[in-house]
Amino acid sequence: METLIMEQSYFYDDEKVLVRTMVKSLIGKLNESLNNGDVNHVHAIIKQGILANHYSRDQYGINPTVRNLRTALLVADNIAPDRSMVIATLLYNLVRNNSIKEEEVVAKFGEDVAKITRGLIKVSQLYQRQAAVRNENFQKLLLTFADDIRVIIIMIVDRLGLMREINHHPNEQFVHDIAAESRYLYAPLAHRLGLYQIKSELEDMSLKYLNRKVYSQIAEKLSETKARRDAYVVDFIDPIKKALAESGLNFEIKGRTKSINSIWNKMKKKDVDLNGMYDLFAIRIIIDTEREKEKKECWIAYSIVTDIYTANPSRHKDWITIPKSNGYESLHITVKGPEDKWVEVQIRTKRMDEIAERGLAAHWKYKGIKSEGDLDSWMNNVREVLEAGSIGQMELVRGMNMNLYEKEVFVFTPKGDLFQLPMGSTILDFAFAIHTRVGCTCTGGRVDGKNQKINYKLKSGDTVEITTMSTQTPRQDWLNIAVTSKARNKIRQAVNEARVRQADMARELVQRRFKNRKIDLDEGTMAKLTKKLGYKTITDFYVDINEGHLDVNTVAEKYEQLVGRLTEGNANAPHGTAEGFVLQPVKDEVPSDDILVIGNNVKGINYKLSKCCNPILGDKIAGFIASDGAIKIHKLECGNLKHLVAKYPYRLIKSAWSGKVGTQFAVTIKVVGKDDIGIVSNITSVINKNADTVLRNISISSQQGTFEGFLVVGIPGNDALDELMKKILALKGVKHVERVNR
């Protein structure tokens, strides 16, 4: 395999040397895990692919053979010399290009290699949707498609190799895109898997390619000061070491310089230059002790450090007494060391350090980055295996369940935008997820180029193009297809709005027909007719007329019959009072051109007093027919009524009070005055002395000598209210009284 047909012009001269070196090193690392014939089989397949032009350079001039060899070697060096991962890395591009069949991979290398190869092919296909890679759901889709965690590991390591290769690539846009993608996708994945060194290198190289000037300035500054900084750390630590040893504590001390990317983030966050950073490097004291002695010994170490160096109180953070929500425990102090430089010191026990470094992505949460509990827990298991570093434990990784998002599907638009939907979602749900207008006019869709109906259930990775028609409208039966709450709510809303429009058209038709037949239309009588015909709401009644299920002429005939019976039956009916309100025909003293009067003779009419203005006996009022058929009584001056009448003038019903009604209305009175002793008692006394008035609720607030009160009273009508308000205003200290709506 070392020769790898070097005579071909496929390799540049520098690549030939690099390939020979990498192949030799890779074989050496995999020697014990390779089967008989593995090397020859891989060599023959790659040679065949190159000769068939299935392994040509990509559009950016990168040689896939070199790239895959570099990735395989990095896997062996940074993860484990795993046979399946390395062989799959070398071959998956050739399987994808049909240079070799999957069956041949299984026959020559086994199902495990084929499984990883399939996963690499599946995730590589996602990159055909370039726009989707930036979507926050892309990481979830990547994990869903991978099937095997080793696929994700290979992709992360491959990205590391690619980032190293493109340092001076001539295509600046390509470099920028790869660096940006590494920052928001691969570095977070690497950290979640515990691949901290890879994560830091990806972030540093991303900064280098995205902002080379800043990167170079920080790197040069660190390089210039490295020797001095190392010497400073030694000088700083030395007296602490001696004091800790004398105290009898079992400890170790670590000193580290932050990564360039971490330094840059801290400089931006704190708006300081490199010289102004407190924690350019940090000292960590890790104490090995029993659980019950942890707090005590951490505070002993704290006392020792602060006895030697002066602490900055504003930079003290105690996460031992009260740990962070993610379980993080540590004492952080910033002290003034030699040369008056500020140094951050972290004090924790071995157990605390283990949690901080390896527990459920704790460090990421500590930095304020959101992560998902289930994914973190699962990733943590993988991290523990990887950090163990043995070949045998890689077997544990192979069997890990990758069904992290089995209750969700991830679907693309033709432009590459990515949507996350619940499992079981249909094309109709996807249409509403894009836009309500798209959902309302949806007639189906094309899924991966094939026509599908609106009830097609989506699968992760589907590319869906919604087909629409301007004449399409939501139907009631769509509720049996839609799964998402957004789609179902929008469908219900659209269906209800359509019914209201139908009812309005039918109402106008009825009014015209009645006018032609010289029939006076009374909405109260019409409401009785709808109930007599078995309709729950007047909207249902008018919709049936609009849809042709009920003939307008039949309605007119039945209406005339009902009017005749009501006239005969009510000729001698008494007009007494009753509790509550009903609608009745107009009395002599009230104009009779289609007016509703509140009384007690005609029963069964669905109406309410509107809460927006709370009309009471004596107010000038009007009725308005709502979309559900109910009549709502408003004050004539009510702003809501004016707005409704402007849109639906034909729904206005003239109304008047039939006379004094034997009941009380709830009215809210606002009183403002001087906060004197006894003022509240005087007000309540006035109310209680009124025989027909009852105080139901009172709310008083006082500020700077002025009180403001809201009183809810039960009162028989407007005249009684005016009289009561005059009496309250006459009280000493009361400055203002008015009726309000609350």
Image (spheres, helix red, strand yellow):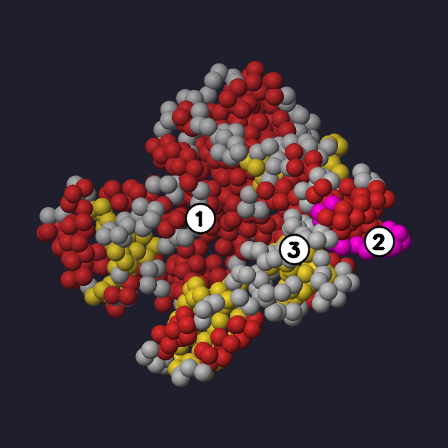
Q: CA distance from mark 2 to mark 3?
A: 27 Å
Q: Amino acid at mark 1?
A: Lys
Is 40 above or below relative to 130? Answer: above
- The mark that comes first in sequence, 2 or 3, is 2
- The mark that comes first in sequence, 1 or 2, is 1
In the rendered image, which residue does mark 1 sit on?
370
Mark 2 nearby-residue class (10 Å; few <14, some 14–19, many ≥20): some
Q: Amino acid at mark 2?
A: Ile
Q: Residue, x 39% and y 49% (percent of image)?
A: 365
Res 28 visible: no
SS of the residue under disc 1? loop
Q: Residue, x 57% and y 56% (percent of image)?
A: 578
Q: Position of residue 184 (x, y in %)?
A: 52, 48
In the rendered picture of this protein, how many numbered marks are placed on residues? 3
Q: Nearer the viewer, residue 643 or 262?
A: 643
Q: CA distance from mark 1 to mark 2?
A: 69 Å
Q: Which residues are magenta?
A: 513-529
In the figure, residue 446 lies in which quadrant? top right
Classified by dominant secondary structure, the portion drawn in magenta counts as helix
In the figure, residue 596 lies in which quadrant? bottom right
In the rendered image, which residue does mark 2 sit on?
519
Is 434 above or below relative to 109? Answer: below
Q: Position of residue 550 (x, y in %)?
A: 81, 40
In the rendered image, which residue does mark 3 sit on?
574
SS of the residue under disc 2? loop
Asked whether the beta carbons under mark 1 and mark 2 sit within 8 Å of each other, the answer is: no
Residue 524 lies in the magenta stretch = yes
Is 316 above or below relative to 359? Answer: below
Q: Residue, x 59% and y 44% (percent of image)?
A: 133
